[in-house]
């Protein structure tokens, strides 16, 4: 893997926001040591939508956790906006496949949690929550508890909550994995629209190559564990893209096929490892 | 691009929720029917038992040992008529209630602190385990020496018993809070107090209530054992007095009064639980209506 550190490092240093520098992370389990990621160098520019793809267990989520400051790298450094990430990185917001809603608060309560933490006045809070509920289409379910919602509605609540505290960078770990195709497309469109209009920086983990190409400015392909970067590909699509007609776009088709060719061998490796 | 352009239709989701609501209603009706049936059978069982008891008394077994339901209810009636029973019940209830309150407040506070401070918890673990293993009844003589034989002794004694039950449950609950939820709150910029109020305590409250539910009978044990040892008022004292007079009906009547008190306590805790954990009843309604 000599060519494993491609052009990504220093890709766009003009407005660099997140930088992983020689990052490795190992976890000490009771019976063995797991090397999650190894020698990752990656630079993410402000406003960029970067998708991390690769076989499961290759440490993509670990990188998000380190960007959020939940883990420290075992070696190497993570920089955010020029300074070392040390402790909770309050500029980032996290959303995972498990939506992590508070089961004891209804939809309104969940969405307004970050606003309460920020100490906003009740009136301001209520207005903002109402706005967000409209945005994600949850009218009529304001007083439902998460257990009373469908999977898609929970996901929309989580997204609204994330947008409520309006972090500069969104760390999204397979956020739409459990959704049906239609809802997923809607969420993707919404996410892309929001990220563009609010100039969000996004690190997005997925297994889904179609999703990777559809959303990304750049896709970072990881090898199986210990995860390192195998390839970084710029997405040749315009930033202002129409997700509904994407499938007719030859550029999209070609890019998806290219990623597929990159991932395929690693999938076989993973299978070999698992057996 | 607007939602309309791509036929954005959350309707499917709403339909799912509506279906779910309908299923929930159906499940609720089924539960009501079952409740009626259960209560009917219960009533028959209990009625049969009392009839058997009444019949056996004096015919199969001497009334000295088992008295008879009619005698017991006469005794109870007399106590109710004179108002004695309410006085004694009030004393015992006050002791148990105050002890329960005091013990659980301390238990919740200490459990939360130790749950959030693993170092302290490790430090104090052997000491707490030792005291926990001690049968709390054995502490009663000490409390009598310290505080005397008044109501405050029973309250302290009850509190000591309840403390450990609530403390251990709270501690476990606080330790079991999802770390991801805590991390997510910290990423929102929350401080320790905000995390405590919004995540840790609501999450631990299920455990706290488990502790409280176990504590209810123990709080009555505390109050009544205290009264059995040294007192002239309260249901425990009534029990001792009836026993001293070889008044079997009186002993049974006192036991009935204690049971009534226990049922009232349990119901109060359950109502409080439902009140403080509205999301739990929402979850329970969904059970079986997946």
Image (spheres, rainbow, N blue to C red):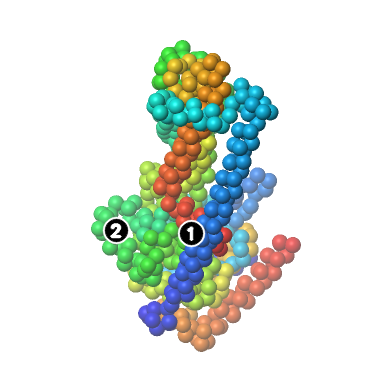
Q: Look at the picture and state if B114 lies above or below B25.
A: above
What chain does mark 1 sit on? A
- The percent position of residue B198, horizontal first and vertical second, equals 40, 48
Depth check: A80 or A275 in front?
A275
Q: Which mark is residue A147?
A: 1
> Total marks drawn?
2
* Crowd around label 2: few <14 · some 14–19 · many ≥20 (10 Å): many
Q: Quadrant of residue B244?
A: top right
Give the left or right position of residue B25, taking residue A129 as reference: right
Q: Circle 2 — which element?
A: helix
Q: Which residue is mark 2?
A: A125
Disc 1 element: helix
Mark 2 falls within which chain?
A
Image quadrant where one finds the C terminus of chain A: bottom right
Q: Is residue A169 visible?
A: no
- Front one among B193 and A142: A142
Q: Which quarter of the figure has residue A62?
A: bottom right
From this viewpoint, is residue A253 visible? yes
Question: Mark 1 and mark 2 in contact (Cβ < 8 Å)?
Answer: no
The CA span between labels 2 and 1 is 23 Å
* Quadrant, the N terminus of chain A: bottom right
Whole-percent x and y of residue B66? Answer: 61, 26
Q: Position of residue B145 (x, y in %)?
A: 46, 12
């Amino acid at each position: 893997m000599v060519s494993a550190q491609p052009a990504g490092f220093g890709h766009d240093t003009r407005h660099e926001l997140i930088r992983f520098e020689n990052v490795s992370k190992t976890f000490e389990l009771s019976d063995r040591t797991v090397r999650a990621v190894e020698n990752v160098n990656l630079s993410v520019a402000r406003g960029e939508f970067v998708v991390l793809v690769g076989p499961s267990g290759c440490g993509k989520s670990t990188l998000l956790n380190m960007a959020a400051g939940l883990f420290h790298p075992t070696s190497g450094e993570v920089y955010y906006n020029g300074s070392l990430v040390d402790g909770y990185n309050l500029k980032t917001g996290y959303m995972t496949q498990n939506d992590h809603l508070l089961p004891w608060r209804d939809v309104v309560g969940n969405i307004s949690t970050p606003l309460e933490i920020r100490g906003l006045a009740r009136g301001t809070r209520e207005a903002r929550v109402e706005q967000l509920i409209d945005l994600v289409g949850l009218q009529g379910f304001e007083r439902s508890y998460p257990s009373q919602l469908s999977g898609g509605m929970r996901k929309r609540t989580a997204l609204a909550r994330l947008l409520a505290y309006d972090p500069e960078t969104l760390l999204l770990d397979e956020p739409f994995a459990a959704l049906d195709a239609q809802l997923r497309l809607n969420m993707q469109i919404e996410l892309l629209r929001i990220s563009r209009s609010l100039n969000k920086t996004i690190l997005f983990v997925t297994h889904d190559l179609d999703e990777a190409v559809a959303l990304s400015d750049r896709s970072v392909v990881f090898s199986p564990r210990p995860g390192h970067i195998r390839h970084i590909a710029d997405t040749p699509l315009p930033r202002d893209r129409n997700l509904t007609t994407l499938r007719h776009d030859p550029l999209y088709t070609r890019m998806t096929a290219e990623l597929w060719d990159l991932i395929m061998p690693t999938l076989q490796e993973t299978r070999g490892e698992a057996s | 691009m607007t939602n309309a352009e791509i036929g954005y239709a959350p309707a499917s989701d709403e339909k799912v929720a509506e279906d779910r609501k309908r299923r929930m209603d159906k499940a609720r009706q089924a539960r009501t029917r079952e409740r009626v049936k259960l209560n009917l059978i219960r009533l028959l069982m209990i009625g049969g038992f009392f009839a058997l008891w009444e019949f056996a008394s004096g015919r199969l077994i001497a009334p000295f040992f088992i008295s008879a339901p009619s005698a017991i209810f006469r005794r109870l009636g007399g106590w109710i008529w004179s108002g004695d029973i309410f006085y004694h019940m009030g004393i015992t209830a006050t002791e148990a209630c105050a002890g329960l309150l005091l013990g659980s407040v301390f238990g919740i506070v200490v459990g939360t602190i130790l749950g959030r401070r693993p170092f302290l918890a490790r430090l104090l673990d052997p000491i707490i385990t030792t005291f926990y293993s001690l049968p709390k009844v054995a502490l009663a003589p000490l409390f009598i020496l310290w505080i005397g034989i008044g109501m405050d002794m029973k309250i302290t004694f009850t509190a000591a018993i309840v403390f450990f039950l609530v403390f251990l449950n709270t501690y476990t609950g606080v330790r079991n809070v999802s770390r991801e939820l805590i991390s997510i709150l910290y990423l929102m910029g929350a401080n320790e107090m905000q995390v405590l109020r919004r995540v840790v305590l609501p999450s631990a409250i299920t455990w706290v209530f488990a502790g409280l539910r176990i504590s209810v009978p123990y709080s009555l044990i505390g109050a009544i054992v205290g009264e059995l040892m040294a007192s002239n008022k309260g249901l425990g004292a009534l029990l001792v007095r009836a026993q001293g007079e070889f008044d079997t009906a009186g002993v049974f009547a006192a036991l009935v009064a204690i049971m009534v008190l226990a049922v009232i306590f349990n119901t109060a805790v359950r109502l409080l639980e439902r009140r403080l954990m509205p999301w739990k009843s929402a979850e329970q309604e969904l059970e079986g209506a997946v």
